[in-house]
Each structure stands twice: as structure tokens, then as C-alpha cells.
Image: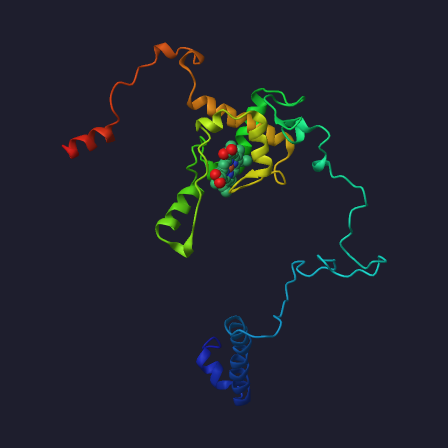
Amino acid sequence: MSPFDHRMLLKDLPKTFVWVGILALSLMLVPPALILRARAVPTEQRRIHIIQNMDNQPKYVDQQENILFADQRSMRPPVPGTVSKSQMVGDTHRFLGTVDGEFVTDFPEGIVLDEALLDRGQTMFNVYCLPCHGVTGEGNGIIHERAMVLVNTGTNGTTWVQPKNIHEEAIADQPVGQIFWTITNGVRNMAGYGSQVRVDDRWAIVAWVKALQLSQNAPADMVPGSDALPVRTKVAPGMEMDEEDAS
Ligand code: HEC
């Protein structure tokens, strides 16, 4: 017999060895079975949490007691008289977009109307405004589209106010200070972004809104070489179809 013949090898083992082997193999199935059960069956008990990944750290959370301070609050109130930089309104032109209670018609000192400002304004507009107002500000952003699906299917009683088209005359005529005010404080159904967008960035967005408004209604003489452009004489293809269908 060859020493590598496993059948012979198994037969030659003492009986107890075989039984202990079978028992050990069966016992090895128990931990995975317990783990699978723990994953599948809900329980009131705390999970066993072996890999901590810094999930539990010594720290104070909101409203927690802290005996270090006489008033035992872990959330420290600001020192009386503190004014946050974002609440400084000494320069109302810059921080509120108003002078003597009237919306300003020009940008505050220090905001330079150049390409960099427009670039910044475009970036910030695309982050904070485009989802609702759309890429050109017509009020048809992706959130509006989605909301209309929910409204039209009557999902969860959704109601929706369409974001304004910033090219509407009433808005195109607004002074820059009013746009700044709207971004900062919101207007009717629109929330304000004063807490999320820094002052200078809000002015940059104002500049971009003004640029968008101009881009959609620019008089021909403001566009260099516009007289060389072809004049649109035909009705849009979709419109033609409709007329034929109707007749
Ligand atoms: C969550 C959606 C949403 C976002 C984001 C949003 N808006 Fe609006 N916006 C609205 C809605 C809705 C209205 C109309 C509110 C109404 O008529 O009740 C509106 C109105 C406006 C108006 C018209 C104000 C007026 O006087 O009628 C302007 C200008 C405007 N938004 C600019 C912005 C700018 C700039 C941003 C980005 C900083 C922005 N919005 C972000 C939803 C949004």
C-alpha cells in the first residue's frame, strides 16, 4: 500500500480520533450559525460591536450635563454682547443689500465686477440655485421636475410652488440689493441661504443672476457681430406639426 492512499490512512486512524474530528467539524458550524442568526433576528439587546471604528468616543453631545462648569451646561452660551461676524450689519450695503431702507442698485465696495466674480457666482448658483431654478434660471430645475411628478401622481399629498423664472420682468427689473436680500433671507416660499452662503459669495451669485438675465434678453446691439447672425424666420418644427395635425 502506498503511504499516500488516504482511504487506508483513515481506516488506520483510531476510532476516537475520527469521532473527535467529526465533532470538531460540527462545532465549527456553530459560530457562523450564531452570527447569521444575530444578523437576521431583531433583538432588544445591544449589538455586539467588535470593530469600533471610533464609533464610541468620549465627548459631550448637545444638551448634555457637564460638571466642569458652574451652570453644568456642556453647550456654552456666547459671552453677553457677542456679535457674530455674520450678524454685523454696520455696513448695510454689504450685509443687507440696503442703504437707508432702500435696496441698493450697485455692488458694495470691495466686490469687483470681473470675470473671477462671475465664475464664482456661476459655481455657487449651480450649487445652490440651479436645482430649483434651472441652469438658466427659468424655474425649471430638476427639483421642480421631480415635484411635478409627485404632484401629478398625487404622491403623499405633495403641494408645490414653482420656483420663479428670474427672467420675468418684475424680477429682471429688481435692483441688485433685492436679489441679494432674496438670497440672504428667502422670499415667500423660498428659504434663505444667508446661513449657508458667505456674504461675498452671495454677491457673486447676484452678479451671475444679473448675467443670466442679460443673456436671455440682450438687445442685439450689445452682442458683437449680431447683425451677421441668421434671422429665425421659420416656426419651430414642433409647432408646424401641431398646425398640420389640427387642420
Ligand atoms: C428649494 C428650491 C429653491 C432654491 C434652491 C432656490 N430658490 Fe429661489 N425661489 C424658489 C421659489 C419656490 C420661489 C418663488 C417663491 C414664491 O413665489 O412663493 C423662488 C423665488 C426666487 C426669486 C424671485 C423673488 C421675487 O421677488 O419674486 C429669486 C430672485 C430667486 N428665487 C433667486 C434664487 C437664488 C439666487 C437662489 C440660489 C441662492 C435660489 N433662488 C434658490 C425656490 C428656490
Return the residue nearer the eye: 44 or 2. Answer: 44
Regarding residue 131, the answer to whether it shows in the image is no
Judge left or right: residue 81 versus residue 148. Answer: right
Residue at the left extreme of this rendering: 247
Say above or below: 3 vs 219.
below
Question: Is the residue 226 above or below the residue 187 in the image?
Answer: above
Q: In which quarter of the image is the N terminus?
A: bottom left
Residue at 24 percent across and 28 percent down: it is 237
Give residue 138's position: percent from left, percent from top.
42, 32
Residue 205 at what x, y percent from top left? 56, 30
* Foreground residue among 105 and 218: 105
Q: Position of residue 151 (x, y in %)?
A: 38, 49
Q: Residue at x 47, y 75 (%)?
A: 4
Q: Which residue is nearer to you in this view: 217 or 59?
A: 217
Image quadrant where one finds the C terminus: top left
Instruction: Judge left or right: residue 75 versus residue 98.
Output: right
User: Which residue lies at the image location 25% right of the left edge and 24% below the top edge?
Assistant: 235
